[in-house]
Image (cartoon, rainbow, N blue to C red):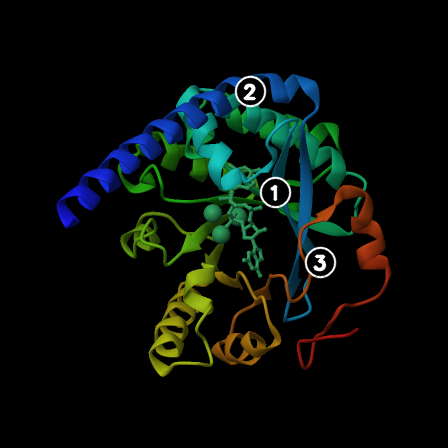
Amino acid sequence: ASKNGGRNRATRFTADLEEERELSRALERDLALALDDGQLRMVYQPIHSIAGGEDEVEALVRWQHPLLGEISPARFIPAAERSGLMVQLGYWIVQRALDDLSRWPHLSMSINLSPLQLQQDGFVGFLMDCCRQHAITPQRVILEVTESLSIERNTRALMTLNLLRNAGFRIALDDFGTGYSSLCMMKTFKFDRLKLDRSLITDLGKDPTSQAVFDAAVTMALRIGAEVVAEGISEEGLVDPVRSAGCTHVQGYHYSRPIEAEAVNGYYESGPTVDRKSDRKVA
Ligand code: C2E
Ligand code: MG
Ligand code: MG
Ligand code: MG
């Protein structure tokens, strides 16, 4: 029975893989149309400074597929990277996001970049032009990168990052602690900010090992002079451990989910949502 079960499992696994490939090809095909068809939009998740710095949002792309419903960017960004659409999509995201930011003069904004964008000719010029057109100083824009294409070994991307930093943009290393980002990267490039991945945060307050690992990551970031954002604060219980570790910024469902562009001004006008002293959410 076990042999048979094994074969069935293997067949099912192969079928799943085939289905997965098929779906991924379909996504790549549909994405090209989605961009022209207005199926993509940006949403914005608040990032709160514990120290009382400026208010911020992170720009996150959404795809409302006509048949499949909302598709996660964790899924379609990789599809865009494979199909060669990422560069075009990236230009669209930056333009959309900075256009929104021009209507929020009191905010700073984080924008996620694919490593492919960093290798694009003229990308630095494009970003600077886009800022100039919208009367946005680069200082208000934080560019988030991950190591997925290994920036260390990619001199082109590294050069672009240096140019961007010299132009006044701040550079953040996203998803720190996930294995895509290594300690060596800290020596290769001077990041302005580290974003500690949700997986480092989930078990805080439950187990001392998690707390030790988290505290060490925060200490390292602070010692190299970087800001530290704790991502994925989804519940009240995570606030104290993150705060006592010394993080400079917090972000997560506990404070706010990503919100529509139209809701951003209202969110910040409705008063401070974080009591800076206790870092408690004020209802
Ligand atoms: P990321 O840049 O690390 O973004 C944070 C993700 O965590 C977002 O998912 C956000 O909605 C989610 N999140 C925030 N707080 C919480 C929480 O408390 N609990 C949980 N469970 N999740 C939380 P999202 O929007 O689905 O994006 C997933 C990833 O897709 C992003 O991870 C980023 O790597 C990529 N991505 C999203 N938008 C863009 C974009 O415009 N450009 C590029 N290149 N990548 C993007
Ligand atoms: Mg990010
Ligand atoms: Mg992240
Ligand atoms: Mg990510």
Q: Can residue 128 be seen in this view?
A: no
Report which quarter residue 154 is drawn in: top left
| Residue 249 position within the rendered picture, expressed as x and y whole percent measured from the top left | 58, 65
The residue at 86%/62% (across/down) is 270
Q: Can residue 214 be seen in this view?
A: yes
Q: Which amino acid does the dot numbered 2 rest on?
A: Asp
Say whether mark 1 is within 8 Å of ligand 1: yes
Helix, strand, or loop for circle 3? strand
Determine contact: label 1, label 3, CB under 8 Å.
Answer: no
Say whether mark 2 is within 8 Å of ligand 1: no
**Cα distance, mark 1 to mark 3?**
17 Å
> Camera-side residue: 240 or 74?
74
The residue at 19%/39% (across/down) is 7
Identify the residue position indicated by label 2 in the image: 30
| Residue 9 position within the rendered picture, expressed as x and y whole percent measured from the top left | 25, 42
Helix, strand, or loop for circle 1? strand
Identify the residue position indicated by label 3 in the image: 55
Q: Which amino acid does the dot numbered 3 rest on?
A: Asp
Q: Which amino acid does the dot numbered 1 rest on?
A: Leu
Between tags 3 and 2, which lies in front?
A: 2
Count neighbours of disc 3 (C-alpha within 10 A) and say few if under 14, some if 14 to 19, many if 20 or more: some
> Camera-side residue: 256 or 154?
256
